[in-house]
Image (spheres, rainbow, N blue to C red):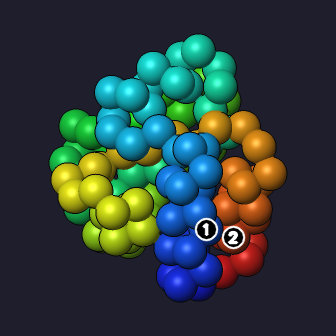
Amino acid sequence: MNRAQVKGLLGLCARAGQIVLGTDQALKLVRRGGAACLLVDGQAAENTKKKLRDASLSHASPLYELPAGLLDEACGQSGRMGAALREGTLSRQLITLLEPANQ
């Protein structure tokens, strides 16, 4: 994963309103079926990771763990440990960057 590219694309998603920040809001979006993928910060608590992992499995939404602090840096809001991307072109580009085959 190219950290600079991911950070730039996450920032663009934030400015375009295509990312939902916060674990609770992300869970609401994935339960409604509007999430392309879930993101979790590397320094999130195990309980937070488990909540997002369970939602990811039950709603067939991929979950990606980001390096510690990347979500905060890219979106400009501190303390956000979970996020969801809305369906769209930006989310597909970000998923392509985050796929293990591209690392």
Decide if residue 53 is in sight here.
Answer: no
Decide if residue 87 is in sight here.
Answer: yes
Q: What percent of the width, then of the height, locates residue 52?
A: 41, 36
Q: What percent of the width, then of the height, locates residue 81?
A: 29, 50
Q: Residue at x 72, y 37 (%)?
A: 87
Q: Is residue 97 left or right of residue 43?
A: right
Above or below, 67 relative to 52: below
Q: What percent of the width, then of the height, locates residue 82?
A: 36, 45
Of circles 2 and 1, the one toward us is 1
Amino acid of disc 2: Leu
Q: Residue at x 47, y 50 (%)?
A: 39
Amino acid of disc 1: Leu
Residue toward you, 69 or 20: 20
Residue toward you, 97 or 55: 97
**First in sequence: mark 2 or mark 1?**
1
Instruction: Determine whether the residue tagged by mark 1 lies in a helix, strand or loop.
Output: helix
Instruction: Determine whether the residue tagged by mark 2 lies in a helix, strand or loop.
Output: helix
Q: Is residue 41 left or right of residue 56?
A: left
Residue with the most extreme top position: 32
Q: Residues at badges 2 and 1 in contact (C-beta under 8 Å)?
A: yes
| Mark carried by residue 9 | 1
